[in-house]
Image: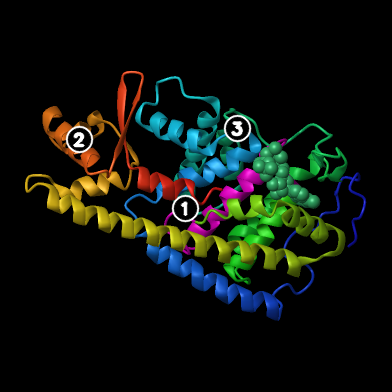
Amino acid sequence: MAWTDPEAPFNELPNLPPATQVETTAVLKKSITANKYLAELKGSCLRLPDPGLLLNTVILQESKDSSAIENIVTTQDALYQAILDPSDGVPSEVKEVLRYREAMYAGIDEMNRTGLIRSGLAINIMCKLRGINNQGFRTLPGTKLSNPQSQRTIYTPPDPQFVSGKMTEWEKFVNENEDFDPLVKMALMHYQLEAIHPFSDGNGRTGRILNVLYLMQQNLLTQPVLYHSSYIIQHKADYYRCLREVTEKDAWEAWILFMLDAVIETSQKTLTFIDKTLSLKEETLAILKTLSQKMPAYELNEILYSLPYLKIKTLIDKNMGTRPTVTGYLDALAEKGLLITRKVGREKYYINHRLMALLTGPVE
Ligand SMILES: Nc1ncnc2c1ncn2[C@@H]1O[C@H](COP(=O)(O)OP(=O)(O)OP(=O)(O)O)[C@@H](O)[C@H]1O
Ligand SMILES: [Mg+2]
């Protein structure tokens, strides 16, 4: 197969598996390393009080590219405020982040219910991401991928009448074929979904969420903590080149190695983040224990490391005590420098600024 004209719809896109042997020595070698780090990550994330914390940062990274997020730190602040006060005028980029979280969690629920990765699941994720209802596969001709700078077409997916059939085959491969190492299979299914390009928009983000769901389905992760999106976005030129070269010259090996590198680097970075967070958490607990006999140090610390932004009401809602009691706790923590306070309108927030620094760190 050689499909070198980016302007011509790729109607001949073959179904998976590829006709050539893709599990080369280099691929197998790297997949062993990637599986090792992923297993370590799976174990380590059980120690985090709320693995969802990580999701927020990565989603911000995703949104930074696709919408106009100027300042990731400010947006992160706005996001945590929105989580505490969802009804107060939430900025649009934060709404986008909240939609992404919702798409990820709804996707996990649906996948757990059916045990399968279906094309309907892909559709539901895409709709949630884009905040739309009742859209399915693209039906209109003319979907093309172009380079935003030069406006040149870089890829034209199959015409709309081929989408549904190719997605049925994709779904069969994903759920039935067990001949490949799961990480290799993830790379294959990701290329295929992107090449089919079943939607008019949101194909990249939907595909990246599906990769994480697939790893969960394979029990390689118990939480959605492998955010290879950051890696992909940071290596976008290579990512696009590798996808293109599978289409043009069956260059599967380079593509699979790229995806395995994404898994390796992301797992390593996430492991470092988890280690740093947990040692900070332990350090904070030790200080909390010296403060007052009456303070429920352990419970408070768990809350501090699952929600970097707190209000007095958050602690009351979590049954940590009456208003005067919990205000006393928070003020004591602020006095020790463990929290900083910020007034926004009539609300007073207590911020675990050291955790925020770790969370905003990996995005840059
Ligand atoms: N040559 C190619 N062949 C197949 N798919 C490609 C190719 N180049 C890029 N893609 C895929 O197309 C995606 C972009 O499509 P689309 O705009 O529908 O997705 P998105 O989620 O809105 O965007 P993004 O991925 O940039 O956030 C890329 O993320 C990539 O996965
Ligand atoms: Mg797009």
The kind of residue tagged 1 is Pro
Nearer to us of marks 2 and 1 is 2
Q: Percent x, y for residue 310? A: 30, 35
Q: Would residue 169 be seen by someone viewing this image from the given angle?
A: no
Residue denoted by label 1 = 224
The kind of residue tagged 2 is Asp
**Residue 153 is drawn in which quadrant?**
top right
Q: Write the residue at 52% across / 60% down.
A: 215
Query: Taking 22 as reference, is 339 left or right?
Result: left
Q: Write the residue at 55% across / 60% down.
A: 266
Mark 1 vs mark 3, CA separation in Å: 20 Å
Which disc number belongs to residue 130? Answer: 3
Q: Residues within 10 Å of mark 3 (few under 14, many from 20)?
A: some
Name the foreground residue: 65 vs 163: 65
42 lies above or below 297 = below
Which disc number belongs to residue 331? Answer: 2
Tell me the element at label 1: loop
Mark 3 vs mark 2, CA separation in Å: 41 Å
Tell me the element at label 3: helix
From this viewpoint, which residue is outermost toward the bottom? 25
Q: Residues within 10 Å of mark 1 (few under 14, many from 20)?
A: many
> What is the magenta range?
196-225
Q: Percent x, y for residue 95? A: 51, 29
Are the residues tagged 2 and 1 within 8 Å (C-beta)? Answer: no
Q: Write the residue at 50% across / 69% down.
A: 37
